[in-house]
Each structure stands twice: as C-alpha cells, then as structure tokens.
Amino acid sequence: MEPVLSRDPRTGEVRAEVGVEADTAAVDAAVRAAYATLDLLADRAKRSALLRAAADGVEARAAELIAAADAETALGVPRLTGELARVAYQFRFFADIVDTGAFLGVVVDEPDPAAVPPRPALRRWKVPIGVVAVFAASNFPFAFSVTGGDTASALAAGCPVVVKAHPDHPQTSELAAATIRAAAEQVGLPANVLVLVHGYQAGVDLVQHPLIAAVGFTGSIPGGRALFDLAAARPNPIPFYGELGSLNPVLVTEQAAETRPDEIAAGLVASYTLGQGQFCTKPGLVLVPAGPVGDALTKTAKETAATAAPGALLDGRMREHFLAGFAARAAAPGVRTLAAAAAAPTDDAPQAVRAGLLEVDAVDLSSELLEECFGPVTVLVRYRDAADAEAVLTRLGGNLTATLHAESGEPGAAAWLARLSRFAGRVIFGGWPTGVAVAPAMTHGGPYPATTSPTTSVGGTAIERWLRPVTYQTVPPELLPEELQR
Amino acid sequence: MEPVLSRDPRTGEVRAEVGVEADTAAVDAAVRAAYATLDLLADRAKRSALLRAAADGVEARAAELIAAADAETALGVPRLTGELARVAYQFRFFADIVDTGAFLGVVVDEPDPAAVPPRPALRRWKVPIGVVAVFAASNFPFAFSVTGGDTASALAAGCPVVVKAHPDHPQTSELAAATIRAAAEQVGLPANVLVLVHGYQAGVDLVQHPLIAAVGFTGSIPGGRALFDLAAARPNPIPFYGELGSLNPVLVTEQAAETRPDEIAAGLVASYTLGQGQFCTKPGLVLVPAGPVGDALTKTAKETAATAAPGALLDGRMREHFLAGFAARAAAPGVRTLAAAAAAPTDDAPQAVRAGLLEVDAVDLSSELLEECFGPVTVLVRYRDAADAEAVLTRLGGNLTATLHAESGEPGAAAWLARLSRFAGRVIFGGWPTGVAVAPAMTHGGPYPATTSPTTSVGGTAIERWLRPVTYQTVPPELLPEELQR
C-alpha cells in the first residue's frame, strides 16, 4: 500500500508520512462503517449536538490544526485562523438549522374527496439520502475539506460521511477527522459518522461504491468531470454535487471606470491575489472600457499588481500549471503583459511566485483566455461598447459569480445585472467575488462548469442536496415519525 | 423525412398520418423558437393566466381530445375523461402556485459585520433554468404527455417547453399542443412557449441541444437510461429528471391477510388490472404470508383475476413484450400460474389480452420476477416469516411506492413503514399505489430506477426541478427584480 506523504509547498520537501492510501477493501470497510451509523443519526437532537461539539472541538484544537495546515498549504496563519473561525461558525449555523427543522420540508395534505383525482391524506417530509462521499479541496484545508461545508451540511441532513482527503493536506485532514470523530463520541454517537480515506484510487472506488448515495466535490474541472462521469455511469446513478471551476467575470461600466478608477483597480488586485489567487471565486476576467476611459484603472491595476507580495502556491504541480498557464495566455494573440507572473523565491519560500496581470482587446480575446487559470493572475479585457462586452459575455460558460461595477443611478445597471444572472449563481454589485458568506441566502453554485447541478454548496440551502422526499399516504399518525404527527 | 403514423391499438391498423418526424434542423428551430420566449415568461401574472387558459382550453376541446386519445390508446372514454379532468385541475393547481410565489424561495439576509466571515446584504431567489425538453409517456396521453405535469410545472417555473411526442398518440399530442399554444396567444404570450416535435432521433437531438437546460422524462428504464446517459455526457451536463420504472411492492402482514383476505384480494386485482396494468404505480410484487394464513387471500385473488375484462394494450410492441414477459416469468423455477395472461380477442378489440396472476415462494424468487412487467400481471410472493420478507425487500431497487397492509394497532407496523420508506418515495398504508394525487404533499419519485434524481414529478414541489438559485450581493434594492425589493 502506498504511503501518504505530507509536503511543505514552500520548499517542495516531504515533511512527514501520514498513514497509507486506502485500497478497495479499505474503502469498502470505511463505507460500511459509516453506513452502520445512518439510523443513529436520525436523532436530530444528537445531530445538532454533534455539530456544536465539532465547533467546540476545532476551536479547542485550533493551534494544532492551523500549524499543520500552514505547514502543508503555505496559506499563512492569519488566513487559516479566519478559515477555522468560519468552520466553527458554519458548524453552529447548521446546528441551528437542524434544530429548527425547516429543511425537513414537512407538508400535510388533509384528504379532499372533491379533488380530481380525489386526494387521500398525505404527509410529506425529507429523509437523509444515505452515506455521502465528500472530496476535500486543496485550497481550503478547513472550510472545503474534512471540516467543510459538505461535511457540515451532510451531517446536518443526517447523512454519515466518508471524506476523501486532499493529498495537499493529509496531516491536517487526519487531525480534523479525529476532531469530528471525538465530537461524535462526546455526544453519544459512533465516531464512524465520519470516516477518512486517502488516495486517488480510493476516490474512484468511493464514487462507485453501492452504499454511497451522493457525492460532494470541490476541485478542478477535469478531476470533477471524471468523477461526475463515474457517478453517472453507475448501475444506479447517484447525485454528484460538484463545484468545478469558474472564471468569475467582472464588468466595469464606463461611468464606474471614470468615477472610481483607483478604488476599483485596488479592489481588483486585492481580490485576485488574495490567497495567491487560489480561490474558486477569484475574478479571472475583467471587462474594462477601452480607450482613455479605462486607461486610468488599467494603469493603477498594473502598478498595484507589481507590489503584490510573492508567495508559495499549494503544491508543486499547481505552481507548474500556473506558470505554464500564464506563459501560454501571455503568448496568445493580442495579449499585453502588464505584470509578468514568475518564480520569485524568498528565503522563507524558495517555491514562491509573483502575481501576473494581462490585458487584451475584446476583439482579440482567444478561447484559452476564457479558461480558469488557478493562481494569482487576471485578464483585463478592453471593450469599446456594450455590443463588444455582450459578445464576450456570450462566450462564457456557467460561473459561480459575476460582478458589476456601475455607479448608483446609472441607467442600464439593472439590465446588466439581469444579463449577468443568466450564467452565474451569485451576482455582486460594487464589490468583489472572493469571500463567500455562510448565510441563509447564499448561493455558491451556477450553471456548468461552475457546478454540476443547480444547487449551492455554501449557505443554509446546501443541506437540500443530501435529502430526498418521502410521502406517507393514509398512514395513521401514530405510526409516523414524530415530526409528521400533527 | 419519415411520416408520423397514428395507429389503432385495438386492431393494430394505421388510422392516420400526422405530420413528419423532426430532423436535426427542425429540432434546432423548435428549441430556438421556444428559447426566444424565455424572457416573456418571466411575467408571473402571464404565466398563471397561461396555465388557467390551458385548463379552460382542454376543457373546451375535451370531446375532441378524448376521442383522439381513445382511438390512439384504447384506454377508454371514462378513464380518459377522468385523466383530462385531472389535467385541467393540475394546470389550475400550478397557476395558484405561480401566484403565491413561494417556489421562488426568496431569502433575504441583512448585512452582519459580526459574522465569520462578515455577511454582506444578500437576496436570494430562484430563476427558471431555461428551455425544458419534455418526453411524453405512452400510458397517460394527457396527464404525463403534452398537457402533463412536466409541462405544467415547467411553464409554471417560467421555462419554455419543447415536447417530444410519444409515438403511441401523435394526433392527441398535436391537438393538445395546439390547445396550449392557443392558450398562450390568448393571454398575450407567443405560441412557442410550447413546441411539439415527433420522432425518435428528435428526442436524441433534443437532449443534446445546447439550449436545452433540463429534461423531464416518463417512460421505460432502457429508454430513460439511454437519454440520461446522453444528458450526462454533454459538454455541459444538464439535469435529467426521469421516471423510469418501479415494481411497487406490497407487503400484507399475517394479521391483515387473516382479517381482510377478500377485501385485500379484490383491491389488489382492481389495482393491478386498472388501465390494463399500464400504470407506473401498478403493484407488481405482493408479499403474502405462506400457508393457510395467506391461502384465502390468494384464492380470492385468483378467482377475481379470472373475471377481469380483457382489453387492448397501448401498442403492438407492448402487447408482445407483455405476453413474452408473462411467459418467461411463468416458466421461472417454482412459479405457479394462478391466471394465464393470453391473447383474448374481442369483436371490439382483436388485439386484446387478458390479465395474468403468478405465485411463487419467497425462497424461489428469481431475479427476473423482480423486474417490472408492464401490463396486467402481478406476482404473489409467499413468505414464511419476517426474515423471509426482509430477504425479498433487500433485493429490491428504488421504487415509486411501497404499500403496507396491516391491521390498526398491530405491533411492528411502524417498523415496516420505516423499512419500506428506505427504498420508496411514497409509502401507502391500507390502500393501493395506483392513483397519484395532484397535491402539495405528493411525492412521485424514489431511488433509482424509480427516478433518476431525488425529486418528484407530481405535486406542488415538482416545480423545483426547473429552477436554479441566484443570489444578489450588495445590489441596491431598486435594481433588483420586484420580488426581491423588500
């Protein structure tokens, strides 16, 4: 069995060996162990207690978790401290949702003999879909990994979870899994409500396991699509809730570019270089007016990008992809390099890179610039008029977000917002897409390839992914689950 | 281009030529024509007016529609009259849903700077997913076809519809489409909110068309799975909401078999022979106690089945499949034939068949008896004890329904209900699964192969399939759609 290695992305060195990859038998054992806890998770009071204990647990072990995550991801202690606070908040947020029970979707129909056809007594609610496989993401070792939104929402729904760890942070994953498993035991549930597995093949086996009822995935388009295809090709296909990739376009109107060039430029650079550009909501394409109207914004963006601090990416493969991806885009026809992404070794991080910034006229925009490039780079697309901008928007696939910078009272702003909502799950006015609030009204999803289904993986309604409806017909109330006995 | 033929299933003869099959160009034109109406359907008041006008329209043309459907399906005027009344009821049911707007799922979050991360102002609702392809079913020429639940719920959601007609009732489909298209024009919408196409290849082209955003399908497992696979294999996979097949098991407890043998037997035979057994909710497997406790029920069922009136099936291919399917099951090891399905020509219907009834001991139950056999046949499975019954349930896939016949106050009834809800979307106590009420609390769906997604195709929440969430972040309320301006 292959060893699981923890690496330091700042240096590229192996720093520890963390267990072994799960073979097919180990994956089967993991899924069966999780499945055995399904009935026990039906107790909603225990589920909310588990989620609150998990929140307490990650806070109690914060120092250890953050140190491991920083060593494995180079994301830095301040960012990881914030991410872990988000995780604790999210566990408690879903605990409250479990307590209210609104997600059960209870509907009671009294009999109506006059209906066509006659209506019998019906009572409907939603039940847990079964064991959920969760694929951890590289770029959020806490918030989209073992302790992430998929895990929290699945447990909230009453589904045991088998997490496939991301190879970029196996040690963090082990610590995080141990924390949740301990929380389960604290509240009288089996530790196996969450089971962790490592290894590429383990992920493939997981998606194909007969007892896996749904999959949550956050990652790349190729990886996510391959797993989506496996889920769809099963003898019994299962829902695959994947968040794959997004360009997150930004449209700056002429009025906005003229009125707030420096503010917008500074906000843009801060957003696309945040976390070294390793956010699924990074703004990757920015429509800026052509000519003098947009030149001030462009100039400030160029100057600000040059001052961005270099940093290490999550792993060596990403670093290579980023540098090669930048070079290919910079070499595309009509592209002007405003800041050159490049290796920028520091004493602390020999593997560090610096941010890039590209510019191209809308008419010259080639298809490769419409593909997400993970890492600190964005493309300013200079457009001459609304038709020019519309021609670019028409070429976009689905997106997690789309952002409009317009001035208040500007005619046409509502139309642009409506246009952007055609292909995005979240439409932002005057802000930036990085930073996804854990909130009842959040949508983190969008038409493919943003996500593989019209759902959200962040926010209150994320729980809906792990439920299926069941209706009881003419069942005497005393034989029904308590929630339906009314 | 291939002609579309209308046939009389009672005689097997061609009765009319109804247009031509759509080639790839015609499908493309149909989808584009429907897509062009998407923005106009955003007007909710017009949508509910359209649905009410459609209800009025089918009522006004009832005689013509029912005559065509009876000639093409042999389902009989009484049944088709009821089915059309259901359709009118369903259009008005969804019109009310459109007016209330609860399905929009509006959630408003006020900003909360203390949240982790800070929460900006968020307003979430759901928007129409795009043009929906609807595949009509053979067995419900009105209620699961052009005028069916998928069409009604998709239009209610604001999605234009392209319907692929079922070859068993092309003339009925043309009349039905003309009725809805006229209703659209009556309320000031374009007729193209619904476009009809014919032909097998047209269906294949439809599922692969770039502007189709989701598919609704009701039909067989092989046909539905082939289309599901095409939808999943698209460059941008789209949701495929298919209702494919279901065995609809019934469990009769010892107490129930002892207490109400004749009532249960009569109810069962009426249910499985209703509409010549051509319901997706037909009870196809009935667990009856072994030995004397279950013998009375079995005897009455045998006697009642012998008196069931012969009738024509929906088409010649179904007739062949039914007779061959019955013969294969009757020849399986341990199977006893209580009533032999067979050709039973009448003056009115030379192609008529009579119902069959099979019996087998649970221990002898072979896999082919666990496959749905479309048409008037069911299998009594005699079980010795709870473990014997459980062993059968364990072998079942997902089902639309599961039914329990137990006596009130019988210990264990609640446990059986919980057990049945594990694999079914609707659990019935003391009744029969045929007959699906159009009601807020209805679930017509279940784990695969019952449906391809954890949703319902009948009832109030069927509308959820055609929506996707969009969240507006920090957008000034005056720039938002009216429903979000609060």
Image (cartoon, coloured by chain):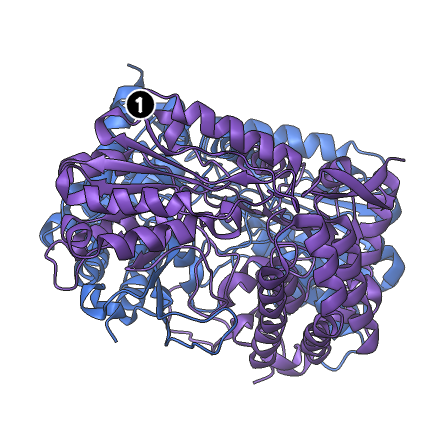
Chain colours: A purple, B blue
Residue lying at 57% horizontally and 59% vertically, measured from the top left: B433
In-image side of A292 versus B410 (left or right):
left
Give the farthest residue toward the bottom: A486
Residue B463, horizontal then vertical, whole percent: 39, 57
Give the farthest residue toward the front: A347
In-image side of B257 versus B22 (left or right):
right
Nearest to the observer: residue B261 or residue B462: B462
Nearest to the observer: residue B355 or residue A85: A85
**Rendered image quadrant of residue B429:** bottom right
Which chain letter matches label 1? Answer: B
Residue B128 visible in rendering = no
> Element at badge 1?
strand
In the displayed structure, B392 sits above or below A384; it is below
**Rendered image quadrant of residue A192:** bottom right
Which residue bears the numbered disc 1? B4
Nearest to the observer: residue B124 or residue A65: A65
In the displayed structure, A405 sits above or below B166; it is below
Residue A50, horizontal then vertical, whole percent: 72, 74
Quadrant including the N terminus of chain B: top left
The kind of residue tagged 1 is Val
In the displayed structure, A384 sits above or below A155; it is above
Residue A356, horizontal then vertical, whole percent: 43, 37
In the displayed structure, A224 sits above or below B479; it is above
Q: How many marks?
A: 1
Quadrant including the C terminus of chain B: bottom left
Disc 1 packing (10 Å; few <14; some 14–19; many ≥20): some
Residue lying at 20% horizontally and 67% vertically, measured from the top left: B482
Residue A138 visible in rendering = yes
